[in-house]
Structures are given as C-alpha cells and as structure tokens.
Image (tube, grey):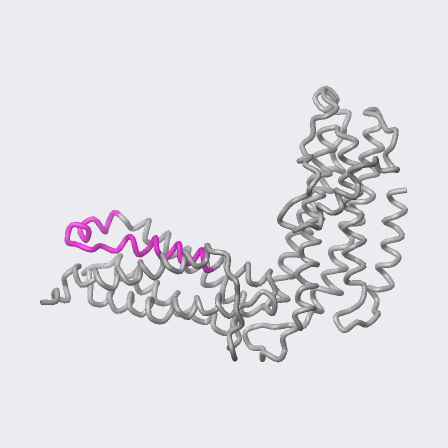
Amino acid sequence: MPPPPSSPALLSAPLTTLTTLLQTFQTILSTPSHQNPIPNPPNALSLLHDASSLRAQTTKLSLLLLNKPFTPSAIATIITSISSECLPGLMSVWEICDGRRYSHILRSEIHLQLKDVESSLLGLVNQIPRDEMAVRGLEGKREEVLGATGQIWKTCDRMNKVAQIGIVGIAVEKVDGYHALVKDAVEELETWDPDEEEGSLFGSSSGSGASNDGVGKKVNGDVIGRAHQEQSESEPPALEGLQIKDMHAVKEGALKILKLIRMLYPALRKRRVSTFPPFDKTSALDAQASEDRTAVLDQLLRYLQGFSDETDEVAGALYGGDVKEVGRRLESLKKMAEGCVGEVRKGWKGEEDEFSAWSEKWVDRLKEAGS
C-alpha cells in the first residue's frame, strides 16, 4: 500500500532516483571523456535554457521546505520534474558540446557550471526530510536550504549568460581576466624597490619565489615548456654578467618586456578574439567556425594564459633575487609571444589587416627590448 500524500515516506523513491542520477552525472563529469560525434545534434547552447527551468523548480522546492505545512506530494512532483526533465536536458549539453567545434574554453566553462549546479543540488536534496523526525528538524536547516538554493540560482544564471554571450563572450572574459593579472603584476613591480628589501632579498643567490622546474606550467600544454627547454642551456645575452648590485637594471629590463606583453592583450582582444565568428544560443549550426579556426582560438587563449603565468614567475624570480631565473623566464616569455603573434598574424579569413602590420612592429620592439 503506497504511503499517504502527507507522509514523508512518499519522497523515498523520487529522492533515491534523483540522488542516484546526480551521482551518476557527477561521475560522468569527473571522468575524462572521449567524444564521439552525435548525428544531427541541436545547438548545445540553446539547450542551456533548462537552467532556467531548474532555477524555477529549486525556487519552488526551497519555498516548500521552508514554509508550513510540509507537503510531500508537491515536493515529489518537483523532484520528479528535476530528474526527468531539467537534469537530462543539461547533461545533453555536455554530450553535444564538442570542444573541437564549440572550443575547449567553452566546454571547460560548461563543465565547471554543471559540476557546480549538480553539487549544489545534491546539497539541497540532502536537506529534504525522509521521515517525521527529520520533518521536525527542518526549521533548523533554513540556512543550509537558502545557501544551496542561492548557489543553484547563481550557477543557473551563469549558464544562461554563457548561452547568451557564446564562444566569443567567454573568450573575451578569459582575455580580460589574464590581462588584469598581468597589469597587476606589472604595477606591483613598478612600485617595488629592491633597495628596501636588500637584507632579505640578497641573503641567498639561489632563493626564488618562482618555480624553477624548467618545464613550464602544465595548464598551457607544452607552450611554456618548449620555450624553457630551448633556453635552459645558455644564459640570456641581455642579462649576462649582471650581479646582485644590478637588480635595478634587471627590474627595468624586465619591465620593458612585460609592458610590451601587457600591450598585446587589448590588441589581440579587439582584432582577433572579438572578431572570431560569433556563435551563441540563437546561432544556426552552419554559423560555427571550422575546427581548424576553433583550435587556433583555443591555442591563442593558452598563450594568453601562459603570458600571465610566466609574468608571475618573472616577478617571483625578481623578488627572490634570482637574476638567472629572471633571464630564463623572460626569454621563455619572448619566445611564446613571438609564436603567439606569428600564429594569429592574419585574420580569421586569412586576410592581412591592421593587426598584421601592427604585430610586425610590435615584434621588432620586443626584440629591441631584449637586446
């Protein structure tokens, strides 16, 4: 005999189904995926509208949990809707969003939001009482319910924004974030006076705030690593013979290069990232850029992240008084920058444009800065 509509036992089966589904999806998102093309898929970004449905359902769910009387039948209906409609719709986005076509930066963003929303939803589900005793203790869980609901709202709103701004919007956000980090690092270096830290700074010639592993950061694949390997056997000519007393000169030389790197961000943002073929939730599939172009965009973003990472390493080496490491990192940065500019010198249609001419002059200035 089924439990009465007012009994918490009515929630047992739908809660078990939803919890199992969430755990299954979390496992899928935590497992490296090998994507097989789906025949005739819809626009993956258009399917993110299920985030709005999930937001609405969790709003109703939290209100039912926080207000009396406790109504298991109404809660069961919402849980069933989430399990059968909202979550499968959102997970289909993950299946369809092939990084080769939608870009890996967009796929990574969707991956992050799906993990967040499913973790928060599981936290909310865990607050739902399954027996009379748990119902009586529900009033003490108000903060937990509100906290989980608020996080779900935030993530659903972010998914809706991702669908709206599309590939170009996400890429621009990434560029602006990396640019801000480089600007902050350069501004801090400009105000740093080596003389003020003379006692601690030069206590050891080998101490460095940078990671001196010579292989670069894995987040950028081999971009940094290749540049380090090419430079590891020789001292950078521009810094040969410099001693600790020359740290002011080392700082100024580093700043010349770092300021040129900083200058590159707005140029690439305007002339390459913002001009990439747009694709959002309203776009037809035939508006997607080719896989080759999308791969170049992903690589460009890896370069820009790499510049930010290497700038931090340069700063750390300067603060640590490691002149040799400063030189190695700067040479790595220069090689990366030249490779980056060379790869996107022409526009997305293979045309010469304002950036093409500007980039050649920029590379000349970069070479002069290191001479």
Relative to 94, 120 lies left or right: left
In which quadrant will I find the N terminus? bottom left
Q: Does the segment drawn in magenta span residue 93?
A: no
Residue at 80% across / 39% down in the picture? 254
Q: Position of residue 250 (x, y in %)?
A: 82, 34
Residue at 63% across / 75% down in the picture? 288
Q: Does the segment drawn in magenta span residue 135?
A: yes
Tell me which segment is drawn in magenta. Answer: 114-140
Relative to 322, 253 lies left or right: right
Q: Position of residue 93 (x, y in %)?
A: 48, 68
- Viewer-side residue, 292 vs 315: 292
Give the answer, above or below, for where 15 lies relative to 45.
Answer: above
Residue at 73% across / 41% down in the picture? 187
Numbered disc total? 0
Q: Position of residue 136 (x, y in %)?
A: 17, 50
From the image, give the main secondary structure of the stretch colored magenta: helix
Q: Position of residue 197 (x, y in %)?
A: 72, 24
